Amino acid sequence: MTNENITIPADLLPADGRFCSGPGKVRTEALDALAATGTTYMGHSHRALNVRFKVAELRNGLAEMLVLPDGYEIMLGNGGSTGFWDCATFGLIERRSHHLEFGEFGSKFTKAVAAAPWLETPEVVASEPGTRPDVVAGTDVDAYCYTHNETSTGVHLPPSRPADPSEGDDGALVMVDATSAAGALRFDPNETDVYYFAPQKALGSDGGLWIAAVSPAAIERIERIAASDRFIPASLDLKTALDNSRKDQTYNTPALATVFLAVEQINWVNNNGGLEFAARRCDAMSEMLYGWAEASDFATPFVKDPAHRSPVVGTIDLDDRLPADDVVAILREHEVFDIGGYRKLGRNQLRIAMFPTIELSDLQALLATLDWLAENL
Ligand SMILES: *Cc1c(COP(=O)(O)O)cnc(C)c1O
């Protein structure tokens, strides 16, 4: 058989073939709910009360889902997580930051910081793709930056404050990129000062926004830097974003559909038991995926240490007999989408999302499909 005329038996295939790691699957129930708003939401002013009420639902629902401590606030603005890196470079890092790099997204933030002439050269601790460095106290830094889940490599790192605070600087902020983690992975918000993300991955919505849960110390930092003589462009000004967020608005027009779909997802999670409900779905999927790969004779988990394997983004190396590019292309023909590995890693690898929106039965079907392909390619 050549790849072009391979037909996978229809009864093997997942009912919903969306396994992309970013953007992630959006539940069709949420899309239906958006369509059902008809004339009552889309096309309304983001200053109108009904839209501001949706933003309030987003902020309150997230505070509940993330179980935020007293004094923490949800703020939001435009530009996604990449935009937030620029906001943080201008408005959160005072002088020098410490970065853990164990994948593409962590290093992109470091690059943004390193290019800012008003900041000192950041301190960077890196580890090989597929591994992770430990959080340790840095020297002379005022912010610790790392990802909760490296979407590029499938490694997660539970947020924690530096182990030996006496070595770290007083009041250094812990800033965690939770773009592919928020709404899926358990964490203790007390260990973070800025837990930020965009809603198109684990949160099952669409792109364009950044959202951040900020501690009282982070709010104090934002206000102090905004009051200093540092130049900050208005669209990246976190004080402006904070003031608008407190009024359930954004500085400029947000994607109303993104807000709506995020609220649908947050309500779905909260009404089913909260973050623990979502985390358990990911646990079940990741146990299935990694268990399958360990038992398989053509697939192996890329991340060697089981404790470091992401519960939401699974990276699976394939045997050379089974080229990942072919597998991805054949599956796409069968409406299973975007399971190719991260390009820059350059491995014969699949990357399979296990976000809370995804059904365990669909993952099971995907694995059965891969077994079938391994036998029939
Ligand atoms: C996708 C992703 C980003 C970038 O998000 P955008 O909203 O596209 O800017 C940043 N960090 C992590 C961990 C991601 O997975």
Image: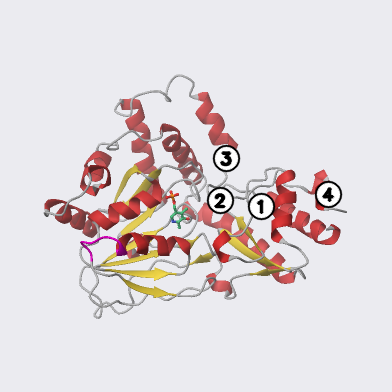
Residue position for label 1: 360
Q: Is 176 placed left or right of 139 in the picture? A: right
- For marks 1 and 3, the one nearer the N-term is 3
Q: Is 329 placed left or right of 54 in the picture? A: right
Q: Position of residue 122 (x, y in %)?
A: 30, 70
- For marks 3 and 2, the one nearer the N-term is 3
Calculate the distance from the C-alpha at mark 2 to the C-alpha at mark 1: 9 Å
Three-letter residue code for mark 1? Leu
Q: Residue at x 22, y 54 (%)?
A: 219
Element on which disc 1 rests? helix
Which quadrant of the view contains residue 304? bottom right
Q: Is 315 placed left or right of 176 in the picture? A: right
- For marks 1 and 4, the one nearer the N-term is 4
Of residues 117 and 151, the one drawn nearer to the viewer in this rendering: 117
Question: Where are the magenta residues, as a range?
Answer: 114-119
Quarter occupied by the C terminus: bottom right
Is residue 32 positioned above or below 193 on the image?
Answer: above
Calculate the distance from the C-alpha at mark 1 to the C-alpha at mark 3: 14 Å
Residue position for label 2: 356
Residue position for label 3: 27
Residue position for label 4: 6
Three-letter residue code for mark 4? Ile
Crowding at label 4, few (<14), some or many (≥20) Cα neighbours within 10 Å?
Answer: some
Three-letter residue code for mark 2? Pro
